[in-house]
Image (cartoon, rainbow, N blue to C red):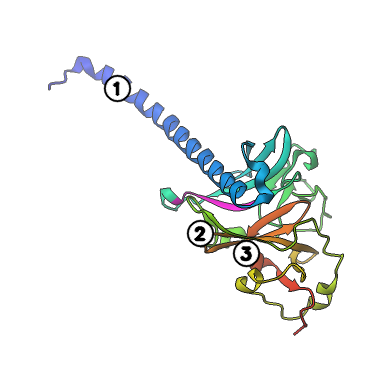
Amino acid sequence: MFVTRRFLPLLGVLLSFALLAWPVHAEESWDKEFHAQIQTWMNELANRDPQFKEWQKADTEVQTLGPNQHQWLVSIKKTDRQVGYLVVGEAVEAPAQEKFVLLEYGVGEYILFDDAFAPREIAAEPVYDGFASYWLIARQSSPQLVNAKTGEAYPASFAANEPVFRSLAAQNLVQTGQRLTGTRILQGTQKDPFDQIGWVSQLYGDSAISWPQLWQQQSDAPVTLTVPLYHSQVLAPFVVGSLHLWNDQNAYVGVWDEGLRFVPYAYADKVGKFYVAGQPQS
């Protein structure tokens, strides 16, 4: 086939349209994969753990967490009532079939970065890092941190630690295509860590608990997770309520924090310590 000069402008126009359309198609494909994976994880949890049954046929709303972080908050609602959330990340350098990772998820009416607790300042930026998540308010004097779960404003002297989630290996996180294969409920209702304060006397002991040991714990021996935050200026204790195992290998710990809040065991073990009621101090 011969192409003469008089057809070159038409080819140029067609090529321009193709180049313009490519990003649109790529974005549509990504968006479709993203929402499909969200529904897959929601269905897994709703079908395998009765605590998540309200997630069946629930609606979702997606919010980006911070610029260029590749993290999203998925708010889950049933008949206009908040019933939980997911925090989803994107493994940029991972194979296509392992594109998305589940950083955190929770069940209940109180979610992370809830508009009801958001700072009024327009410049407040959501920053996700597990238990240390916060809104960052930029001010001329010094930035201020606001707790992402409670809306509590910390003193201006508080400073954030280096993000921990970035250091977690992808194999410690739930990835695209993985299924919930194991569940255990240790404490089925909201518990206050200060109802039993035996963990306080163990704070300075060696309390290392492996995942197999945690999985074998009975409900009559409450487990408390303590997490120092903001360069140890805050100590946050949580009662462990449930345990999840994905693909028989990726472990997540659910703690009571105005609802159940699940984080990777690898993360919880890295930033905090587990204490079992009645366990002798060593």
Residue 12's label in the rendered image is 1
Say which element carries label 3: helix
* In this view, the mark in front (2 or 3): 2
Instruction: Tell me the kind of residue under disc 1.
Output: Gly
For label 1, the crowd category at 10 Å Cα-Cα, with few meaning under 14, some 14 to 19 and many 20 or more, is: few
Mark 1–mark 2 CB contact (< 8 Å): no
Question: 117 or 75: which is nearer to us?
Answer: 75
Quadrant hosting residue 205? bottom right
Marks 1 and 2, how far apart at CA: 50 Å
The answer to whether any part of residue 230 appears in the image is no
Instruction: Tell me the kind of residue under disc 3.
Output: Tyr
Residue carrying label 3: 265
In the image, is 273 to the left or to the right of 18?
right
In the image, is 22 to the left or to the right of 168?
left
User: What x and y, as percent, mark residue 186?
Assistant: 72, 63
Q: Which of marks 1 and 3 is nearer the N terminus?
A: 1
* In this view, the mark in front (1 or 3): 3
For label 3, the crowd category at 10 Å Cα-Cα, with few meaning under 14, some 14 to 19 and many 20 or more, is: many
User: What x and y, as percent, mark residue 206?
Assistant: 72, 81
Residue at image location 72% in from the left, 46% down from the top: 111
* In this view, the mark in front (1 or 2): 2
Residue carrying label 2: 247
Marks 1 and 3, how far apart at CA: 55 Å
Question: 56 or 7: which is nearer to us?
Answer: 56
Marks 2 and 3, how far apart at CA: 14 Å
Q: What stretch is highlighted in magenta?
A: 98-105
Say which element carries label 1: helix
In the image, is 168 to the left or to the right of 227?
left
Instruction: Tell me the kind of residue under disc 2.
Output: Asn
Q: Is residue 176 above or below residue 75?
A: below
Q: How many marks overall?
A: 3
